[in-house]
Amino acid sequence: MSDAAILERSQALPQNIPQMDFDPYDVEVLKNPYPYHEMMREAGSVVWIRKYGCWAVTRYEEVRTVLNDYQTYVSSAGVGYANFRTEEPFRPPSLVLEADPPAHTRARKPLAAAISNKALAQHQEEFTKQAKVYVDRALEMGEIDGSRDLAVAYPLKVFPDAVGLAPDGRETLLDYGNIVFNAIGPHKDNAVFADATKNAAAVTEWIMAHCAREALSPGGFGMSIYEFADRGELTEDEAGMLVRSLLSAGVDTTVSGIGNALYLFSKNPDQWAKLHEDPSLTRHAFEEAIRLESPVQAFFRTASKDTELSGVKINAWDKVMCYYASANRDPRRWENPDKFDITRNAQGHLAFGTGVHRCVGRVVAWVEADALLGELARRVKAIEPTGEPVLRAQNAIRVFDSIPMRLIPA
Ligand code: OVV
């Protein structure tokens, strides 16, 4: 939509629909989003974002409703602000993320098989061993950057290893993830997106080369996707595209989840004391951490027809921004929602989404978090902040580039 068309549409909306004037992609908002989430939640069940001419849902109930109705709210027009109906997609669409059933169902199956519990069990020992290596190193250093030395270093070792990639050039995975997730936001007049995509051509070329069969070692998640091609269930190109999905979705998300957990623990020493006392709470604590500091803050859906959502008329092909991070702090759903409490039951949080698109890789995230945070829980008595954490301005992901901390050994 042109700016003029957006203005016209905004002016024509019924009086009772809350219209938001702030820019969700302003750097200041990205760095301090929660007051804006609260403002939207309190304004109404569905709000209109004037700057972009799209809807936003921020309450738990409406986010769930939209995500669970994949026929009305489709992913095939893109899960970012860009509308694939009227705009050329930024990259060839993902076969899973940017697809609807039945194509989505068919594409998801090989991904789910590649990272099934059985497949993961074969890598479990290595994930555990590497957690010891990285925690040993961190304890030796004493003062560390929780982001660089743990939240980035560990996933960037174990995940590409499990996929079957060679060790060289892995930082490119971070650059690519940063491109893909920033592309969820607006592309026009957006400095964050422009900055992330400066080297997009070279980064994309590296990624696509590493999605090829020749780049993948036997026994990894990547090669097991190519086994579907061997059986004629996927074309060679489709297999490559699904490996691209692994590489797109598998790194930044876990880097963020683990880092956000470390950040929360550094700010809440009583919660770390609890975890140290009972490391069997690790999984529970990780779920609570990603409820409160959700790696993916929001994805979009697109209305496939005229519809109504909580009494608000949505037009066919309108974009709807679904705020997982806000649903996860909705006081209508959570008691004391802004409190980090590792003993609370965080089940039902929407950090992995819900419905047919619910994160297919969450098992990998759990294995990584269990291994690394579990090892820390056993061996670290206290985590002390030694400086201010630095948040990255990112259009979709909440991630710290730096979390200075001191680890006190048990
Ligand atoms: C969940 C997710 C995020 C980013 C990319 C993809 C999936 C993909 O399939 O490429």
Image (cartoon, grey):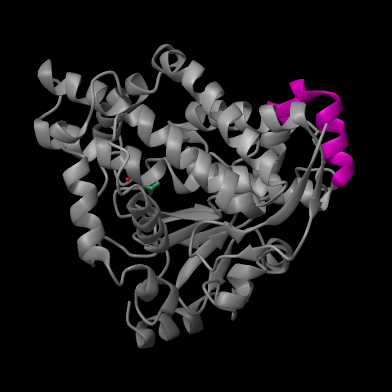
Q: Which secondary structure type mostly characterizes the magenta part of the structure?
A: helix
Look at the image and tell me whether residue 92 can be seen: no
In the image, 397 versus 18, the foreground residue is 397
Q: Where is residue 252 in the image (x, y as percent from the top left)?
A: 46, 49
Look at the image and tell me whether residue 359 can be seen: yes
Q: In this view, does 229 lie to the left or right of 377?
A: left
Q: Does the magenta stretch include residue 282?
A: yes
Residue at the outermost front position:
140
Q: Residue at x 65, y 38 (%)?
A: 349
Q: Which residue is drawn at 18% across and 25% down?
A: 226
Q: Where is residue 286 in the image (x, y as percent from the top left)?
A: 67, 35
In the image, 16 versus 105, the foreground residue is 105
Q: Give the position of the N terminus as an image quadrant.
A: bottom left
Q: Is residue 219 above or below residue 344?
A: above
Q: Position of residue 88 (x, y in %)?
A: 20, 64
Magenta stretch in the rendered image: 269-284
Q: Which residue is drawn at 37% across and 85% down?
A: 3
Q: Determine which quarter of the picture holds residue 269.
A: top right
